[in-house]
Amino acid sequence: QQQVKQSPQSLIVQKGGISIINCAYENTAFDYFPWYQQFPGKGPALLIAIRPDVSEKKEGRFTISFNKSAKQFSLHIMDSQPGDSATYFCAANNFNKFYFGSGTKLNVKP
Amino acid sequence: DADVTQTPRNRITKTGKRIMLECSQTKGHDRMYWYRQDPGLGLRLIYYSFDVKDINKGEISDGYSVSRQAQAKFSLSLESAIPNQTALYFCATSEGARETQYFGPGTRLLVL
């Protein structure tokens, strides 16, 4: 059973558009929610992360929105660029373990 | 040089063979992890270790074993490989429980 559910599985966005990826979880013990970016042939790399005591975190063009009551969080990529084309994973941490979503393959068209 | 290295990068083996995947890190982190990645399933935790004497099972440890030879080295073994262990395997390290995980480049394993 997937602890973190991620959607959509794939996403196509035009250059300059907004990319939105959503994740949902059930375990209220999760207390750290990172997003990882993975390029082909590489390992995932941390993009941005949030803790449940804040509702939003922004770093450059990347924003995490966090809704604790709904147990959902999302990644927004503003002004999406072709270089953002990659697979994105959300994750949730329960002290010792990370649980990852199934991944979203983003393709930003020039 | 990369902070987290994995060897081999690619491996083809046959059903029933024993195989070892190795991971080394120069980040000085105590925590090390092994994950497998399958299309549509994301990354799933196989084993994790908080120090040389502390080894813990993850979500999908059946059919796998690990060895923490030193703070910097964490190996994953498949005692008798089977085709459904064909996957991309990643090693990762972190400094603490809610800290960034740093991933290696991965090992692509094909079991025939």
Image (tube, grey):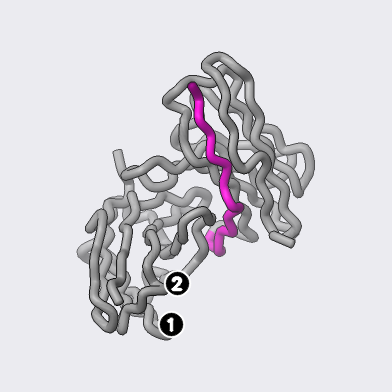
| B78 relative to A27, above or below | above
Read off the residue under disc 2.
Answer: A48
Percent across and percent down for residue A75 are 32, 70
Quarter of the image where one finds residue A16: bottom left
Tell me which amino acid carries mark 2: Ile
Is A26 drawn above or below residue B66 in the view shown? below
Give the mark nearer the N terminus: 1 vs 2: 2
Q: Residue B57 in the image: state x and y as whole percent.
A: 54, 34
Residue located at (68% from left, 41% from top): B7
Residue at the farthest front position: A110
The span picked out in magenta is B98-112
Residue A15 image offset from top left, x and y in percent:
28, 79
Protein chain holding label 1:
A
Mark 2 residue element: strand
Quadrant, the N terminus of chain A:
top left
Q: Is residue B65 visible in this depiction of the protein?
A: yes
Q: Are marks 1 and 2 in contact (CB under 8 Å)?
A: yes
